[in-house]
Amino acid sequence: MDGGLKATEVAYLAGGERAAVRAGLIMLYRRGRLETDERGRVNRTGADPRDGEPFERALYNGLLGWIGPRELATLPRVRAALADLRTGLRRDGELRWPWVRVCVPAALLALPAWAVARFGAPPLVAMPVVLAGVVAAMWFIPRRTLAGMRRLQWLRSEHAGLAAAADLDPRRAGLAVALFGNAALLAVAPVLAVRGGLLDGGRWSRESRQSAGSYGHWTSTAMHHFGADGNYHP
């Protein structure tokens, strides 16, 4: 279904730590293991989701009280689980290792310049050589590898129907949010998305006492689509 990756792995590949946390929260919410209050905080409820993904369970076990969604990524247990996601994606060739993103571009920039200086190449030869080194170096800077980019492209094409689907099981809900971001988030869990400020990366606990004006742009915009019945109307 997802090319061998879990939903939270797809989320990390697509958008990093915040995206993984957001997908994990949505999965917990769809399992009935997460609740949210009017101040935008989240907390766990019910029993440990033993059929959940490892990162999803790490989120659940890290929730020991009401907390702003954005703070979850700072909790030690969640930090360790995020590191596991990142390492797994690097081992699978979906993400680049840090040394590749630093050392390879540096070498590709330095070697052509050294060669030009060493052999005294004329300008018409030197400029294309240096430019080729710059272009090659830029190829290795992005966090995703070519395989990772192709994987996301294939997944978005394969699961295009999830972008606006509302009635999804926890795993498919997490995958939808991982692949299609805010559009899927509002379709799957609009109340959680808006209260928790997930459309803008999540709220901090210190913001929970502030007015709606403290929400980010996307969340504030979405608030206008909630009717008097408390439901979200796109």
Image: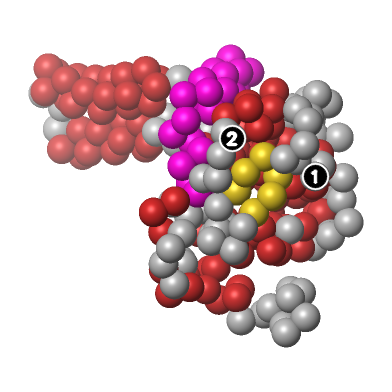
| Depth order, front residue of 178/124 | 178
**Residue at 54 percent of width and 28 percent of height:** 78
In the image, residue 215 above or below residue 176: below
Q: Earlier in the sequence, mark 2 or mark 1?
A: 1
Q: Secondary structure at mark 2?
A: loop
**Residue at 62 percent of width and 32 percent of height:** 59
The residue that mark 2 highlights is 63
The quarter in which the C terminus is drawn is bottom right
The answer to whether residue 132 of the structure is visible from this angle is no
The answer to whether residue 217 of the structure is visible from this angle is yes
Question: Residue reaching furthest bottom?
Answer: 228
Position in image of residue 209 (x %, y %): 43, 63
Q: How many marks?
A: 2
Q: Mark 1 is on which residue type?
A: Gly
The quarter in which the N terminus is drawn is top right
Q: Secondary structure at mark 1?
A: loop
Position in image of residue 133 (x %, y %): 31, 30
- Magenta span covers which residues? 68-94
In the image, residue 154 above or below residue 227: above
CB within 8 Å, label 2 to label 1 = no
Q: Quadrant of residue 136?
A: top left
Residue 38 falls left or right of residue 32:
left
The residue that mark 1 highlights is 32
In the image, residue 81 above or below residue 37: above
**Residue at 70 percent of width and 64 percent of height:** 190
Position in image of residue 155 (x %, y %): 76, 42
Q: Main secondary structure of the magenta part?
A: helix
Residue 59 falls left or right of residue 122:
right
Q: Quadrant of residue 21?
A: top right
Q: Mark 2 is on which residue type?
A: Leu
